[in-house]
Image (cartoon, coloured by chain):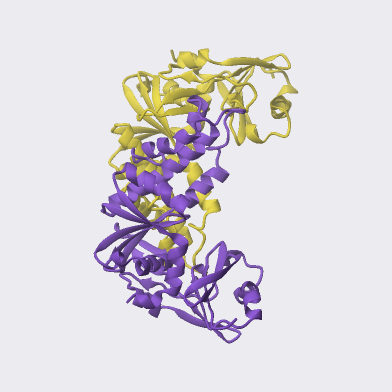
Chain colours: A yellow, B purple
Amino acid sequence: MSGYRVVGDWGTSRLRLFRIVDGAAVERVVGPGIAGLATTPADALRAGLADWRREGEPDMIRLCGMVGSRNGWLETPYVECPATASAWRAGAAAIDLDGIPVTIMPGLAGTTPRNAPDVMRGEETQIFGAIAIDPALRRGRHLLALPGTHGKWVLVDEGCVMGFQTFLTGELFALLRDHSMLTRAASAGEANADEGEGFAAGLARSLDGDLLGSLFETRAAQLRAGRSAAWALEFLSGLIIGSEIAGALAAFAADRVGLIGDPALTARYAQALAAHGHATTAYDGDACALAGLTLLETIA
Amino acid sequence: MSGYRVVGDWGTSRLRLFRIVDGAAVERVVGPGIAGLATTPADALRAGLADWRREGEPDMIRLCGMVGSRNGWLETPYVECPATASAWRAGAAAIDLDGIPVTIMPGLAGTTPRNAPDVMRGEETQIFGAIAIDPALRRGRHLLALPGTHGKWVLVDEGCVMGFQTFLTGELFALLRDHSMLTRAASAGEANADEGEGFAAGLARSLDGDLLGSLFETRAAQLRAGRSAAWALEFLSGLIIGSEIAGALAAFAADRVGLIGDPALTARYAQALAAHGHATTAYDGDACALAGLTLLETIA
């Protein structure tokens, strides 16, 4: 085994490494996120690479994500928007692991359409990956959405990232699911036959434009309208995702939205966007991340 | 000691008992909330009353709050809105403690202005208490706000509770403060000189009407605009309180808002409502609760 590279996405909660041979990912390894390491980042990376290195050293390693944050391995300053792929690439930081060159890609800093400061680390790799995969994104203006813990909505113009806005969608959903009374079963032994209606009901409620004043319905509907806890969880998901979409569409005008992420999650967003009358194009999040880490040479 | 009554507010996280002599509270005792009892509710109440009972038994006990919920002591069905004070009083449930008559006041069930189901348990006592204290609330239409973990906005007409809406304000603030990265210091050793500007900045941001898309600014402003963690906590408070107020004022049209609660908290709401051009009248939350539990006879 020789002539291979390693690329990886090292986020808060997970490390994903890919072994690249002739431009294609041939193996992958998963490790701990940068936030909860028991060892140094270098030792954690050595552990992840151990099997591959037994048969030969990689030519280089390229990493993106929170590994480049203040609390990561090596702080990589944000690249300011508007940001082209080449400006992003030029902002990378260099370090080494036992003599192997390691490149850490920077995040992006920008402003929202309402002029608030905003930042990302990791999503920019998927965005530039999508631009590398789909030539259409290199021409004209496009709105991209990357659903997740901190969902990003991104305006791309001629392949350049102009600005973006973060929505706390996934984090808020998880906090309310795990730490509030909202979705805990309000009565025992109830049926879940209504589960399939919850998401659409939450989406419909989000159109009122009053997220904070609608959240409690998740519980009140169990107490007063006979809804199951399973319905409530779906209602909460629809309400929060719908609120993200309504907020984003008010901030960024666009007819079509490119969705980058896990296919099950982007399908949920496609359903919600269709309810707003918006067409979508889906890009697989893993493929975009890999493209961003390997196909950098194909975009200006 | 004889000829005394006991009234109390027994909520999820706290029991507050008052000894009433000649219509006035002369002593108070605090005990554990109904949600986390290690004993039966009856034994917890006995423990709270022990000192007073040594000198004589109370004539009666009247309790409000989550003690009447499905997971409380004795489930007291919700009284449906529109609800008068007399309908509320008629909905009380009777039980006894060692032969002492115990009355448990019901909560209210209603619908929001946008036709979602909603419930309250405990706040109705403060509302009917405010109506007992202030004769003006028994004539015409009034909008009352009870800020808190689950903030309630309540429409009162001729002393009757017509409907209400719950805002998850306090719970959301506490969840984000305690379980998210938003307000954790993004850099060490920073000054807090900007703390006083955070609340107003959060209120101003809430006017965008996009809570979910504005929460991340709490962190991004620390990373990119040199804001302190203390500023961020105030920004978060202003953003969430401002979102509650904007949502409530869109749902309930009113020029003046009656605020019921802890004076420090209602002052914060008065500041935010003044920014929206609304006058306020403040009612002390404890005084209203006590009035609701003791002055029932004075209102129809």
B248 on left or right of A33: left
> Can you say which quadrant of the picture contains the N terminus of chain B?
bottom right
Residue at x 42%, y 62% (from the top left corner): A220
Vertical placement of A247 versus B90: above or below? above
B53 on left or right of A294: right
As rendered, which of A197 and B99 lies closer to the eye?
B99
Q: Position of residue B100 (x, y in %)?
A: 56, 84
As rendered, which of A66 and A6 lies closer to the eye?
A66
Q: Position of residue A287 (x, y in %)?
A: 50, 29
User: Hey, which quadrant is residue A218 in on the image?
Assistant: bottom left
Q: Position of residue B13 (x, y in %)?
A: 56, 61
Which residue occupies the extreme left position in the image?
A: B140
Residue A256 in sight: yes
User: Hey, which quadrant is residue A97 in on the image?
Assistant: top right
Residue at x 57%, y 19% (from the top left corner): A76
Residue at x 49%, y 70% (from the top left corner): B69
A152 on left or right of B54: left
Q: Position of residue B2 (x, y in %)?
A: 57, 83
Vertical placement of A251 versus A183: above or below? above
> Can you say which quadrant of the picture contains the C terminus of chain B?
bottom left
As rendered, which of A189 and A36 lies closer to the eye?
A36
